[in-house]
Image (cartoon, rainbow, N blue to C red):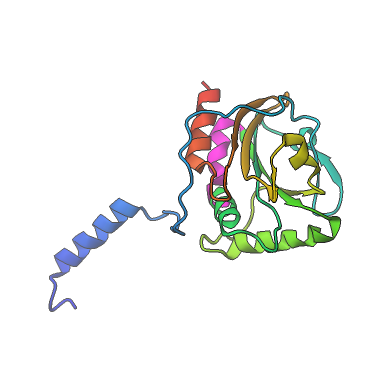
Amino acid sequence: MFDRFPFSIVLFATVLAFATLGCSRIPDDGVRFAEVSASQPITIEDFSGLRFTDKDGNEVALSEVMTREYLVLVITRGWYGGVCFYCASQTSRWARRFDELEPYDAQLVVIFPTETEEEAPKLSELTKRIKGGEIPNEDIPYPILLDINLMGVDQLGIRAELAKPSTYIIDRQGRVRFAYVGESIADRPTVDSVLRQLEQLNR
């Protein structure tokens, strides 16, 4: 190869590739989410009463898991015969960029809706997809809670087959500061969109 192409050209191309792409660029799985600049109207103003279930079957209130000023609540479509490609992509991106919430005094919780308690073990399918999907992650740095029987989904008015994929930013008082409810399973805000909302809240 080096007989055909001078080493200096190969070196320049390598440097250019790293400068353009970056060493730590997130692998591209081909999914494009929405660039969102404003919050949608909200269905309920106070999220402090929402309760979900942890992987051990214990009931958990959102207020009990909040340790930061803001909580980013990502509600996936849930178990509908499998974990959808978009849920896996969205949650994988958040796993890779979780540390970027730190400067905004924010944390992340992911909700996985299931229609019955018997489907709760399907949570392992989601965790498997997050760790080993198209955008692999070694671990999952945020909690995943279950919404068994879609109780939270119905309180929020986002039921559609299971749940419309939704993202909220909630403050320590339980007030919603940002809301985005997708109209399709692919309609979700980018991580950057959510971080920009947090930046505005921290001004």
Does the magenta-highlighted stretch encompass residue 30?
no
Can you tell which quarter of the image residue 52 is in?
top right
Spot occupied by residue 1 in the image (x, y as percentages of width and height):
19, 78
Residue 113's x, y, as percent?
A: 74, 50
Task: Report which quarter residue 39 is drawn in.
Answer: top right
Vertical position of residue 54 compared to residue 62: above or below: below
In percent of the image, x 65 and y 28: which residue is there? 42
Q: Residue at x 62, y 57 (%)?
A: 139
Name the side, left or right, on which 148 lies relative to 197: right
- Where in the figure is residue 151, as x and y percent of width and height? 81, 42
Quarter of the image for residue 168 reads top right
Total number of numbered discs in the rendering: 0
In-front residue for pair 86/43:
43
> In the image, is residue 98 part of the stretch drawn in magenta?
yes
Residue 133 in the image: x percent, y percent? 56, 64
Magenta-highlighted stretch: main secondary structure? helix
Write down the region rendered in magenta.
95-105
For the residue pair 142 and 15, the one nearer the viewer reads as: 142
Name the residue rendered at 62%, 62% in the picture. 129
43 is higher (above) or lower (below) than 186? above
